[in-house]
Image (tube, rainbow, N blue to C red):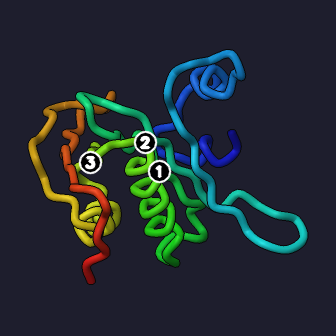
Amino acid sequence: MELNDLSPCPWPESVMAGDFDENSDVGISYLGAFSTGAGKKLLGYAVLGREKGEGLLMALMVRPELRRRGIGAQLLAAVGDCASYLGFVRLRLRVRRSNAPALALYRGMSFVQRSVSRRYYADGEDAIVMSARLPLENRP
């Protein structure tokens, strides 16, 4: 929850709590990146769901002070592997039009823009809808 609270668009705590309820069957997977050694710390997380028969990257969050160190790319690769294991052949996502670092990460992992969801976010910003065929490719 602490890391979720650092997000510019945090999910309501009740939603996340429901996802982690052992009796829940929402079909959502949370993947985490943790530090090693003493005092293991959550560095980032990703959330995988489904939409229209495709895997859906619902969230990707890395601690602000640890960004641009490859953690997001590792999480994205893990989500792609998980989605493939679950039988998906494509992975889709939505990203804020203004989020240039995320757009660069996704493009570098073979995502291409498919459409734009106008005024998708609560503040009125557009979402870029992207997708990639699995397995993901890391393109420099």
SS category of the residue bearing label 1: helix
Q: Identity of the amino acid at label 2?
A: Leu
Q: CA distance from mark 3 to mark 1?
A: 11 Å
Q: Earlier in the sequence, mark 3 or mark 1?
A: 1
Label 2 crowd (10 A; few <14 / some 14-19 / many >=20): few
Task: Say what amino acid the circle numbered 1 marks.
Answer: Cys
Amino acid type, mark 3: Val
Q: Is residue 47 left or right of residue 88?
A: right
Where does the image place residue 133, in percent across and percent down from the top left? 22, 55
Tell which of 128 and 52 is nearer to you. 52
Q: Is 81 situated left or right of 89 in this image?
A: right
- Residue 73 against residue 82 in the figure, above or below: below
Could you tell me if the residues under marks 2 and 1 are in contact, i.e. CB atoms within 8 Å? yes
The residue beneath circle 3 is 89
Residue at 42 percent of width and 35 percent of height: 49
- Which residue does the numbered mark 1 point to in the structure image? 82
The quadrant of the rendering that contains the N terminus is top right
Q: Is residue 133 above or below residue 105?
A: above
Mark carried by residue 86: 2
Q: Nearer the viewer, residue 10 or 70?
A: 70
